[in-house]
Amino acid sequence: MARIFSQVDLLLVPSLRDEILTITNFTGHPSLTLRAGFVEVSEARSDWAPDPAHPLPKFSHPRCVPHGVTLIGRLFDEGVLGRAGLALERALNVAGQHPPGF
């Protein structure tokens, strides 16, 4: 991680992925997970391998679900992470978006 962060200020990664969670849990690098928008899905999704005996349910109508990203920052540099998160949230214009019914 020291080598990577000698070249970049932060990392933008998919949210809640096993690989980056394992790394940051062991190193203590700060992270910020935020909504990047919404996607419509017509069936339940999982990062786990599908079980043919128990297929994931399909929805009769597509559902609007949040989609997130995670920023990973340098050790003890949470200010950069926070400023980048605010800028990204503004650029994506997602702060006021909510699924129907919320």
Image: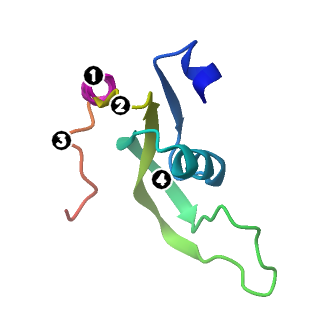
How crowded pointer 1 is (Cα within 10 Å; few <14, some 14-19, many 20+) is rated as: few
User: Mark 2 or mark 3: which is in front?
Assistant: 2
| Amino acid at the residue labelled 3 | Gly
| Left or right relative to 88: residue 20 | right
| Amino acid at the residue labelled 1 | Ala
Judged from the image, the secondary structure of the residue bearing numbered disc 2 is loop
| Amino acid at the residue labelled 4 | Glu
Q: Please tell me which of labels 1 and 2 falls first in the chain.
A: 2
Residue located 50% across and 47% down the image? 15
- Say which of 60 and 18 sits in front: 18
User: Mark 1 or mark 3: which is in front?
Assistant: 1
Q: Please tell me which of labels 1 and 3 falls first in the chain.
A: 1
User: Mark 2 or mark 4: which is in front?
Assistant: 2
The part of the chain drawn in magenta is 79-92
The residue at which mark 1 appears reads as 87
Res 48 quadrant in image: bottom right
- Say which of 39 and 9 sits in front: 9
- Residue 94 at x, y percent in the picture: 27, 37
How crowded pointer 2 is (Cα within 10 Å; few <14, some 14-19, many 20+) is rated as: few
Residue located 21% across and 65% down the image? 101
- Residue 25 at x, y percent in the picture: 53, 52
